[in-house]
Amino acid sequence: MDSSQVVLITGSNSGFGRLAVETLSKAGHQVYASMRQLHTKNAEAAKSLQEWAEAEKVIVKLVEIDVTDEASVQSGVGQVLAEAGRIDVLVNNAGFGVAGVQEAFTLAQTQSVFEVNVFGVLRMCRAVLPTMRAQRAGLVIHISSGLGRMVLPFMGPYAASKFALEALGEAMRYELLHFGVDSVIVEPGAIPLPILGARYSCPKTRRPCKATEP
């Protein structure tokens, strides 16, 4: 990527999203860091990111996007397009993880995982891809997991959502190839992330589960 790339990253409040924002902005790219509940739940994370940008003397623009909400996605993507005029790279990083015995999950709980990890990605792609096709250039990066290729016990719903994500990402690559747009999948290995303590909990006991997959 050259230094003029406009990059939109979802789930930028922590983990891989925050790391991607820091890395790409320091490399000279025009980064839009998106997160949900920008002025409430994630207000502290947004402030921390702004303070980091000021200290590093880089520009990071914040945008509110909840990938589970169609109106929020359209509004956030519209804001980026209005300000930057284009989107060169979309990083689908926002994710939701759970761990536990599959039969202990209600249907609604499993659906909530897919709502973020699969349907949230589709919402973002549907909002961004028309612009990339018109540009005849673009890159969509899907942050998956090693569990998008293999299965571990107690990680069934999460792994299933990542398997689905990877199928969509691979099919998308073939569909977009002739438009100059690429779709790639990143499968991080085991790494401790803040999301584990906040969201990886057994639906039966409500206690945090020990896990190391993002």
Image (cartoon, grey):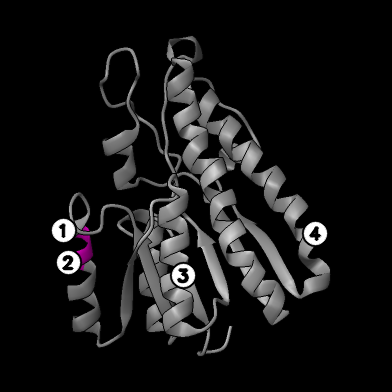
In this rendering, the answer to whether 94 lies above or below 132 is: above
Percent position (x, y) of residue 57? Answer: 25, 88
Foreground disc of the pair 3, 2: 3
Q: Quadrant of residue 166?
A: top right
Res. 47 mark: 2
Write down the residue under mark 4. Answer: 175
Question: Where 187 falls versus 77 (above or below)?
Answer: above
- Secondary structure at numbered mark 1: helix
What separation in Å lies between label 3 and label 4 (alpha carbons)? 24 Å
Tell me the magenta residue range: 44-48
Pointer 3 with pointer 4, Cβ within 8 A: no
Which of discs 2 and 4 lies nearer the camera? The answer is 4
Q: Say which residue label 3 marks.
A: 78
Expressed as whole percent of the image width and height from the top left, the position of residue 124 reads 54, 57
Magenta span contains residue 204: no
Q: Circle 4 — which element?
A: helix
Judged left or right of residue 133, residue 131 is left
- Circle nearer the N terminus (3, 2): 2
